[in-house]
Amino acid sequence: MNWNWRAMRAIMRKDLAQVFQNKMVWVPMVIVPLLLQVIMPLFLIVLPSIFGVEQFDPAELAPLMAKMPAFIKSPFENLTGLQQWIMLSANYMFAPLFLIVPLMVSSILGADSFAGEKERKTLEGLLYTPLSEMELFVAKVLTALIPAIIISIGSFVLYGLVVNLSGYRVMGGLYFPTAVWWPLVFWLGPAVSVAGLGATVLISSKSKSFMQTQQLSGSLVLPIVFLMIGQVSGLFFLGPIVLIVMGLVVWAVGLWLIWIGAKTFSRGELIARI
């Protein structure tokens, strides 16, 4: 199949230009990463210094440390209580929260893919572009997926700078990232983007408004909240092998959702709903 990439890129450029003109779309994509990747970790890392707590009793973290498997516990050996707190906060407590960034960006852009076109009264003209239904669907998917991956990697770099600089004096050097973050950022993160996007585009193609799509897709964050609770409580720990296996499952679900969306996408049905 010879795809009309020129027309597809034109659709993608138009959609991205509209994103930057809509504050409801781009403002959350700026605020949420700043909150999760800058403000919250910075606050937790400098919190002991703010309250004058320069020495942490390692016994306070002992119950959680006891539950850690050996391969995760090893970086904590020979650290003071305060260093353990910083290492735990930066490298493990915030690891599941990172997944909110790719999920949020792909979901917001996916929600704007068709529902936003309906609100702007531009959907009918879009559907008559010289693209097949598959080409149009893929262009919409790529419009959300590529920025989600770029913003996720940028957030990872920003987070690394923040935690390393803020904790450098206490830790005596660079301490982020640990091995957990590489599969998290470059394997599970893109998989979460694809899965969230697949679900959101399906919802967007059926919904009447951008806000309705966002509300319906908001429940997608619940599995990440569960991962966060499990990690902090010591119920389980996200090691590299666990993340790779989770990524395989999420990739399979995400690609299946996008395949379903591509197969069920119909211009006639969308026009009937305008």
Image (cartoon, rainbow, N blue to C red):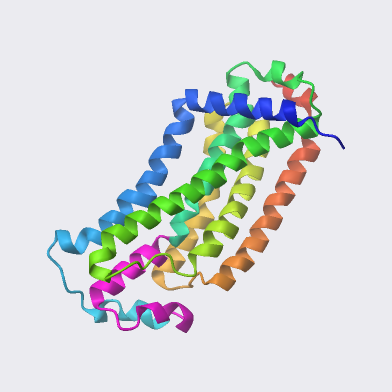
Q: Is residue 162 left or right of residue 127?
A: left
Give 212 or 167, whichever is nearer the viewer. Answer: 167
Q: Which residue lies furthest to the front in this view?
A: 173
Q: State the residue at coordinates (46%, 73%).
A: 235
Q: Give x and y (percent) for residue 18.
A: 54, 24
Give 194 or 221, whichever is nearer the viewer. Answer: 194
Looking at the rendering, in which quadrant would you find the C terminus?
top right
Asked which quadrant contains residue 47, the reply is bottom left
- Rendered view: 113 above or below 34: above
Q: In this view, does 262 lie to the left or right of 15?
A: right
- Rendered view: 104 above or below 121: below
Q: Give x and y (percent) for residue 57.
A: 21, 78
Residue 3 appears in the rendering = yes
Looking at the rendering, in which quadrant would you find the N terminus?
top right
Residue 217 appears in the rendering = no
Q: State the residue at coordinates (30%, 69%).
A: 173
Q: In this view, does 71 lie to the left or right of 121?
A: left
Q: Is residue 205 magenta?
A: no
Q: Give x and y (percent) for residue 81.
A: 25, 76
Q: State the residue at coordinates (69%, 54%).
A: 253
Q: Give x and y (percent) for residue 48.
A: 19, 64
Q: Residue furthest right?
A: 1
Majority secondary structure in the magenta region: helix
The total of numbered circles placed on residues is 0
Magenta region: 68-94
- Rendered view: 33 above or below 186: above
Q: Is residue 70 magenta?
A: yes
